[in-house]
Amino acid sequence: MARLALEAAPEVAVPRRFLLTAPCWGTAAGLLLIVGADLPLLSRWQPATLAATHAFTLGLLGNLLFGSLLQFLPAAAGVRLRGGVRSGLALYLLLNGGVALLTTGLYRMQPATLTAAACVLAAAFALLAAMTVPGLLLAQDQRLLRAGLFTALLAALLTAALGMTLSLSLSGQVLPPWPLPDLTGAHAAWGIAGWVLLTLGAVARVVMPMFQGTAVPPAWAQAIWLGIVPAMLLAASAALLVLGHALPLRLAVAMAILVFAVSALWLQWRSPARRNQALRAWWRSGLLGLVAFALLLPLRLRGDLLAGVIGIGIALPLLAIGMQLEIVAFLGWLDLHRRCGRGLRVPGVHQLLPETHKRRLLYAFLAAAPVQLAAVLWPAAPATRAAGVATFASYALLTFALAGLRRRGRRFFARATA
């Protein structure tokens, strides 16, 4: 099992700004549902629905994945990042500036804004690759882990390229080589099952044993999964874009997700539940949501909206936020450790963010889930507005909890240096 190399971890500010910004995009998605409630969730092609979806995928999940990778790669995978603090800040500005442009352009269907969003987000993903890929190729240890993250980054670049093509097509800048619905399906599949799922699968090999006390999954099994998932996505994407057959891609995504979710649930069930009960609960909830997402995806219920809300709006955020809470608390501890130096005992990770706070946050997100699903099953302005309020409230509570963690760290440092 990998061990954390604290001396190799980057400056705390580099990953933390991504992780602390992520909940703001959750609240933004809630606001989009509130103000767009007069156009309820009748279709995934509604401007407000498109904007809220990308606030979740690129704003929330994008920031969480970018920030987690920038912390995880040096500390757990032995990968040296290129560019340092300045590149980290530039990456942060490009990603969040691009998401702001994209959500605005989709909500208002402004061609110039969509064109600008495509260019800025392409630059963000290119910079992420420049900061991480050389180190992934040159590092010596953790070959399976590095292979998984490298494959996930390739999938992220392909997702970004497809998204850029879609944005430029909607803005009238290019004539797409394929029908927009097919191009959108390939873009979504590579984003969810390629970028997000492969990243989670690679990272889970380290974080589940380290933070949840599970067994390490067999290397041969994970290597097979890691090879099959992109191969299935490539073959199924070709079937969609060349032959116009959408079902193979849906089945490929569903199978990839189902294998990951069931395997992770099995590892949790087989392990003694002795530590990090809150994190285990976050992941258990998210994994069960992924199982439901995988089972519903081929059925196309409510035009994919039901599966989309379960997968993108509920399940994946539960997994990512569960780890976010651990990482931000760890970064708070690491910051105090570096600033205070040796000889002074700093508060532990669980003192900076107690287990009870994590559980309360989980309950808030689980309480919001039925409201979000109701807005899809009974599409009407009041239901959509209620889903927006529930989404906004849960992410506002998360923002408040993360701010409280930082306040506790500052208070300790002020007392220690007084």
Image (tube, rainbow, N blue to C red):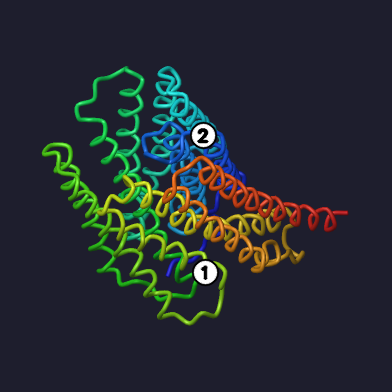
Q: Nearer the viewer, residue 47 or 265?
A: 47
Query: Can residue 380 be seen in this snapshot?
Result: yes
The residue under label 1 is which amino acid type?
A: Ala
The span from disc 1 to disc 2 (Cα, nearest Å) is 33 Å
* Disc 2: CA contacts within 10 A as few (<14), some (14-19) or many (>=20): many
Left or right: 347 in relation to 301: right
Q: Which residue does the numbered mark 2 point to in the structure image?
A: 36
Up/down of 63 relative to 72, above or below: above
Residue at the location (75% across, 66% down)? 345
Q: Quadrant of the C terminus?
A: bottom right
* Disc 1: CA contacts within 10 A as few (<14), some (14-19) or many (>=20): some
Q: Which residue does the numbered mark 1 point to in the structure image?
A: 281
The residue under label 2 is which amino acid type?
A: Gly
Residue 94: image location, x then y, percent: 50, 31
Question: Regarding mark 1 in the picture, which secondary structure is present there?
Answer: helix
Q: Nearer the viewer, residue 119 or 364?
A: 364
